[in-house]
Amino acid sequence: MGDHTKRQPRLSAGIVVTRMLGGTPHYLLLRAYNYWDFPKGEVERGEHPLQAAKREVKEETTLEDLVFHWGEVYREAPPYGRGKTARYYLAESQQGEVALPVNPELGHPEHHEFRWLRYPAARASLGGRLQPVLDWAQALVAGKT
């Protein structure tokens, strides 16, 4: 009970979701207020980060049919907030039927909007902390044969 050891930094896990449209990769971005991000959320105790990432994508976008062509590789963004780290995996969505369901705890969707964007537009929408994550994803997607 009186555990005063330093708290582990909190980990969020998410997925850079890509989808081929007209032969060009598009990336799924979600907007909350003026901030664009990939689907992500906090990893719960005892949960594997990849499982958390899949759960969050399903909760935030209803997408489930993700294909992890690149395996379990991930990229972490620099810490944000109170030492929170965000880890992003990369997956392809077979269909793009995104919905923004109501979060039962909030009583409204977590995000205001979603967009499937090509790399340049996605990069321009993201903040500097997330641009390297998109660059990493784009390099992997472009290298896929």
Image (spheres, grey):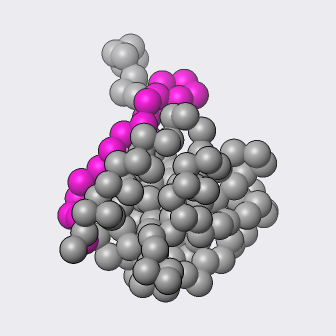
Residue drawn at 56 percent across, 76 percent down: 62
Residue drawn at 59 percent across, 84 percent down: 97
Q: Can see residue 124?
A: yes
Spot occupied by residue 77 in the image (x, y as percentages of width and height): 42, 37
100 vs 17, left or right, is: right
| 82 versus 34 height, above or below | above
31 vs 108, left or right, is: left
Residue drawn at 54 percent across, 64 percent down: 118
Quadrant for residue 85, please give it.
top left
Quadrant for residue 3, please give it.
top left
Residue stretch in magenta: 69-86
Spot occupied by residue 87 in the image (x, y as percentages of width and height): 38, 45
Q: Nearer the viewer, residue 44 or 133?
A: 133
Residue 83 in the magenta stretch? The answer is yes
Residue drawn at 37 percent across, 16 percent down: 6
Q: Can see residue 104?
A: no
